[in-house]
Image: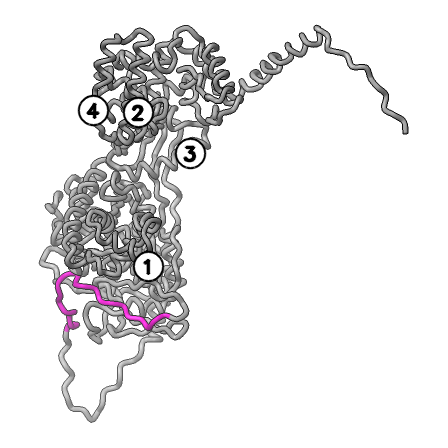
Amino acid sequence: MQAWPHWPQRAPTSRQWAWGLAAIPALCLLYVLVLIPFTPGIRDIRKARLEQPAQILSQDGKELAIFKRSNRTWVGLDQIAPSVVQALIATEDHRFYDHHGLDWRRTASSFVYTLGGDRQGGSTITQQLARNLYPTEIGRAPTLTRKLKEAITAFKIEALYSKQEILETYLNTVPFLYNAYGIEMAARTYFDKSAGQLSVLESATLVGMLKGTSYYNPVLNPERSLARRNTVLSQMVKRGVLLDATFVQLKKRPLRIDFERQEEPTGPAPHFAQQLRKWLISWADKNDYNIYTDGLVVHTTLDARLQNWANQAVARQGRSLQGIADAGWNQRDGWNPASPLVQTLVRESPEYRAALKTAPDADAALKALLADKAFMRRLRTDKTRVQAGLLAMDPATGAVRAWVGSRDFTIDGFDHVQQARRQPGSTFKPFVYGAALQKGMNPEDKRPDQAVEIALAGGEVWRPSDASAPSGKDMTLADALAYSKNTITAALMQEVGPAKVVQLARALGVRQSPLDPVPALALGSSPVTLKEMVNAYGTLANGGSYQEPMWVTRIENRDGELLAEFAPTKSEEALDGQLSYELVDMLRGVINKGTGRAIRQQYGIRGDVAGKTGTTQGNADGWFILMHPELVVGAWAGFNDSRISLRNDHWGQGARSALPMVGDLTAKALRARVIDAQATFVAPENNHWWHRLGEALRARWKQWWTPAPPAPNPASKQPAPAPQAPEPAPELPADTAPARITTVPATGLPMPEEVIEESTPLLPLTPGMGWPPTAPPAEPSP
């Protein structure tokens, strides 16, 4: 076998060693040059310091919100106590004024210590600023690439800014926990004073947090914070900015924290602003803008006066309903540890899941929590907190005029206008009657007020009922809607077909929520949003023409130059104009003589208005939507958990829980002439041949299919009875307790949640209260 040749081994020459050693820094330099394009540009650094957040304005020029990147108030270096700067430089970067972004000696020493197992940071203040300003571009991973990016960015910052500007920017951008960014918000959060008033001890405490804000949190970890504070003070002594004798005195003093979380100003329409921010971010991304830095000025459709009145109406009614809820859920009656519902709520709590880890078994965990009075009190407060939502829109344009998503955004940020889906109850009924009109029926058609049984799949039977027993008399469709008759509406749904009702609801504006085409949909079994329902009623108020909701009219830059302008979308015909007018006229009856009569009697609204109340089973949801030719207002009241109700049949109905919010706002809008008190819904002129043909066919159809009256009996000599007016429905207290919907237990098809509604005929109107009023006052009193 042939052996491999033996090559002689030679040691590298001095020239080869020199080239090899020179190649290392050359490769490092090349790598740095490659990284430069991947670090923030100088223009971006300037923008970060001079960022101008988007300003959101109402229709009338009032500020609604500022879209800041963080909760920060920028202060100049001359407004910051000198002790803060002294503590910062002494602790974080004592050669700050001697380097140009990178402290080579400190970097080398940290490298040596790290290799020895004692990991230390060597970042200068400028490097920390680069990391704080650009966490995404630079990153947080402990890698060489990140350190090089950080150093390159630091050099750029040093080339652009003076040392004073770097200190000012750093102290205004560093985070201090609890949504506090910058030294000013930190001073307010931990010591309830401005940054210029901080003492040496307070300055050392805040600077000490920078090593690890959570670890040295003075609220949760006071011992660690105190020790770190004293370390900062010792560093100040070491760097000659604090006398040793002063340090001996100061290190013995306690922290004396005066903590108060600094919340961002929510503005008058926080839920509206929250939804608008999402839309604006999308628009800005598509058009190469930044909502936090480019000084955008966004003009919205919101009316500041209507928004203020809406906030007041929701707050006032929320307090009233909360008192009723508290009375109904007291410990003796509703909130009883023996209650199955209360026990279920306890089992669903995070505290119960935590207790399972330490308790011997589930029963022991439950028993311990049920006996914990403080926990049970907190749980009851959270679960029985009344919530509400209100939305007002211009039906002609779809412009949003007022938006209240909850009683208090700081307590509950969940938006009950756009996010919450709840069963609408009888506010869904107009879609059934609208579909009936589309099929050729008219408001004066009659249906018997009688018990109804509807067979469902799997042998199930649905038996809707009303507050009072069926009269057996015929009732017009207009009156059935005005008095919110469950039985007649359910029977009408069978005539029309659920698919047609779903189709109409979709066309009118219920376009996001799924609608289950089952018989119970007639009474509002499918959950929807308040925004969808108000939009659908707005379509009716707009003569059957659908308008997409809009909330922005134009966007300008900081100099007032127009960047974008928005107009109402092209309308879509959802319902024939004449049929839409007839349906609105039927809903006038709800206000004039039906379940919404309080709008006129209690709030003195004399204008041409129409609307509908709604209540779901157990009074879990109360709804009311009111239509005016220039404004549609809808409100919902209930609880976040649909298993919770007011436990009060009187106040739980939509006519008493939701209607007051709408009535309060609308009355003020009329009184202030925000909307015209004399505006009316105008019937379309149906002079086209197809309208006349349709009316003729409808009349002929009724003539063909209406049964003839029985022939008189010649043997009978009894005189014919004198004509009598239709027997009025029994007069019951307004919005009496809704009746139950009874069903045979479901075995196949899932039954929707039972839905009920006030179906009580109300007292007749007094003279002058009907529509149209003889002389509507310009400023009706509520």
Q: Can you say whether 422 is above or below 720 in the image?
A: above
Q: Is residue 730 magenta-colored? A: yes
Location of residue 754 (image quadrant): bottom left
Which residue is pictured at 27% across the width and 11% down the height?
82
Mark 1 → mark 3, Cα distance in angstroms: 34 Å
Magenta segment boundaries in residue numbering: 725-746
Q: Amino acid at mark 4?
A: Arg
- Front residue of 678/451: it is 451
Query: In the drawing, does residue 459 fall left or right of residue 486?
Result: right
Location of residue 260 (image quadrant): top left
Mark 2 → mark 3, Cα distance in angstroms: 25 Å
Which residue is pictured at 44% across the width and 25% down the height?
135
- The tag earlier along the polypeptide, 1 or 4, is 4
Which residue is pictured at 31% across the width and 49% down the height?
355
What SS does tag 3 mark?
helix
- The tag earlier along the polypeptide, 2 or 3, is 2
What SS does tag 4 mark?
loop
Label 1 sits on residue: 431
**Numbered tag placed on residue 283 in the rendering:** 3
Q: Can you say whether 726 is above or below 628 in the image?
A: below
Label 4 sits on residue: 256
Where's the N terminus, which quadrant? top right
Q: Residues within 10 Å of mark 3 (few under 14, many from 20)?
A: some
Label 1 vs label 4, nearer the camera: 4
